[in-house]
Image: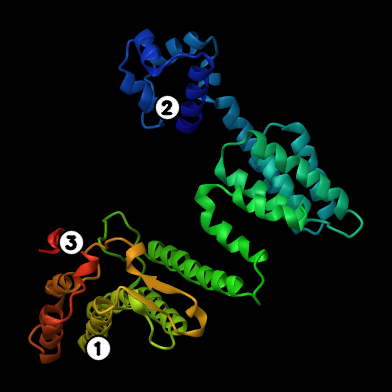
Amino acid sequence: MKQYFAGNLKKLRKNADITQEKLAECLGVLPQTVSKWERAETYPDIETLPSLANFFGITIDELLGNDQLRTEEIIDQMIADIRETARQGNEERAVEMARAGYKRYPSSYKMMDYLCTVLQSYDVTDANWNERKTEIRRVAERILEGCTVEEYRYGAIESLCMVCEPEEREEMYKKIPSGFSFIRELWMKDLLPADTEEGLELRQKNIIELMWHFLNEVTELCGRWYPRGEHDPQCDIDTWIGVCEMKLAIYRCLFRDGDYLDFAWNAASAYSCLAEAYMSKGDGEAALDCWEKTAEFSEMNESVPPYAKHTSYLVNRLVYDEAKLGKFGSCGSPEDYLHRMKQPLYDPIREDARFREVMHRFETGPRNLRKRDEKDFEWVK
């Protein structure tokens, strides 16, 4: 409800053409308080709500967005009913229900967005597609004309790309909201065929981007990462081992020639996480194997030249250019790994010759100082 209230208050204030400072003065509160209300960080107390509603000449229900909330609940139920109708095999009826929902709530961008989806997905035939295309275009353009929610704007552009002429697509792609810039790159492949050099390079870039997005989502889902917060969900240790091994398998597939370049950091990090996981299970030998691989990839990462090209087939049009990347932090540096190895977790193998050798490699191995400032190492000291 805070989000509805915050949006309503901001809209009401702007329509009344008054500043946050002026509204605060009229209500006897600080301007910062009004600002926090509009950012949905805080909520007015029970005594302030009537004054705020009276100021704008509306009811408290209208101010709080209760009517809007109830409408959203009705629309959500309608969408659920449409999906269930389609699931049961009556797609024609599902389309009728979606059109009826749009007719009932013609100003709901959620309903517009869902109608576009239904028109592209249910009961589509060669006979009705041209008519559908016109309808989709009309609804999607309405979304773009007035909606500011990026999710719905992106959906509208996606729908328009489905129905527009090929020559219109490039302009459509340019309109994709900034928050969906990665999607724009994925879509651009439609304009760059795979039998062209540009098209091949774009697909390789997309592979890397997809890998980043996928592995980041998996990592956040598992909640085992540095620094680890107490609030994070924690998957079981065997699942985490499987995730780390999956990461390494993906890296090996992409860089079959061993041309990891700056991605050597990712492999080193995955091996260090595996070392911790195996040590938690009491498997010191496996942990030592992983620390040796961590050192190997860390040295590889620290030795990456300022500019280099990948050679493996899936990435051979991509380059590493340090000049375009700026400076890195200390995460993944030899100092970082040394810091991790000092954990009490490793006390059972601390005197092992292999463990001491790995620490020595981190202490004396190469340092790619072009990539870091000395201050970046402060948190591990």
Q: Earlier in the sequence, mark 3 or mark 2?
A: 2
Residue 146 visible in the current orientation: yes
Instruction: Say which element carries label 3.
Output: loop
Q: CA distance from mark 1 to mark 2?
A: 54 Å
Query: 123 and 356: which one is in front?
Result: 356
Kindly identify which residue carries mark 3.
373
| Residue 337, quarter of picture | bottom left
Q: Residues within 10 Å of mark 2 (few under 14, many from 20)?
A: many
Q: Is residue 176 left or right of residue 269?
A: right
| Residue 138, quarter of picture | top right
Query: 357 and 42: which one is in front?
Result: 357
Q: Is residue 216 left or right of residue 14?
A: left
* Quadrant of the drawing holding the C terminus: bottom left
Instruction: Name the amino acid type tagged 2.
Output: Glu
Instruction: Name the amino acid type tagged 3.
Output: Asp
Query: 198 and 140: which one is in front?
Result: 198
Kindly identify which residue carries mark 1.
289
| Residue 190, quarter of picture | bottom right
